[in-house]
Amino acid sequence: MAAVMGVVWFGAVVAMMVGGVRAARHRADAAADLAALAAAARVAEGTGVACRAATSIAADSGGRLSACRVRGRIVDVSVFVMIRVPIAAGDLRVSSRARAGPVGDEGVP
């Protein structure tokens, strides 16, 4: 009976872990999208201003900006979210990338 309870407990922990990772992935995606849009809105003010806007929005969305690259009016950002995983030792880093800019500019459809 104890073995069955252990298997059920382990299965529940794994299911919660997978759900947590999926939620973190969605949070990272949303943070990257919003950060890229914020940077693209400020790109006319300069690369520094655009990337600072992306950093702020990513932090407000629960993520951290790991990269910000401006090429013309196109902005590429990478954002990550850290989550604690109950089975593994330490934290798990979930990352996402996004691009924003004017439609049809620099080969972007």
Image: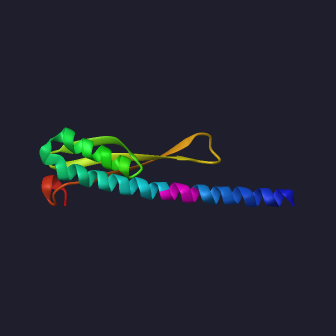
Left or right of 89 in this view: 9: right
Locate residue 20: give its quadrant: bottom right
* Residues in magenta, as a range: 18-23
Quick check: is 81 in the magenta stretch? Answer: no
Return the x and y of residue 77 as percentages of the image width and height.
30, 47
Q: Residue at x 66, y 56 (%)?
A: 13
Q: Would you say 94 lies left or right of 97 here?
A: right
Q: Magenta span: helix, strand or loop, mainly?
A: helix
Q: Viewed as shown, does residue 37 lie left or right of 12?
A: left
Location of the C terminus by quadrant is bottom left
Towards the viewer: 108 or 91: 91
| Picture quadrant of residue 9 | bottom right
Q: Vertical placement of 37 versus 69: above or below? A: below
Q: Position of residue 33 (x, y in %)?
A: 31, 56
Q: Nearer the viewer, residue 45 or 12?
A: 45
Q: Quadrant of the N terminus?
A: bottom right
Q: Within the magenta stretch, is there residue 21? A: yes
- Tell me the residue at 62%/44% (across/down): 88
Residue located at (16% from left, 55% from top): 107
Figure disc tally: 0
Q: Is residue 29 above or below residue 93?
A: below
**According to the image, what is the colour scheme of the structure?**
rainbow
x and y percentages locating residue 56 in the rendered image: 31, 45
* Image coordinates for residue 98, horizontal then vertical, percent: 31, 53
* Residue at figure coordinates x 27%, y 52% from the top left: 36
Describe residue 82's horizontal placement relative to residue 51 as left or right: right
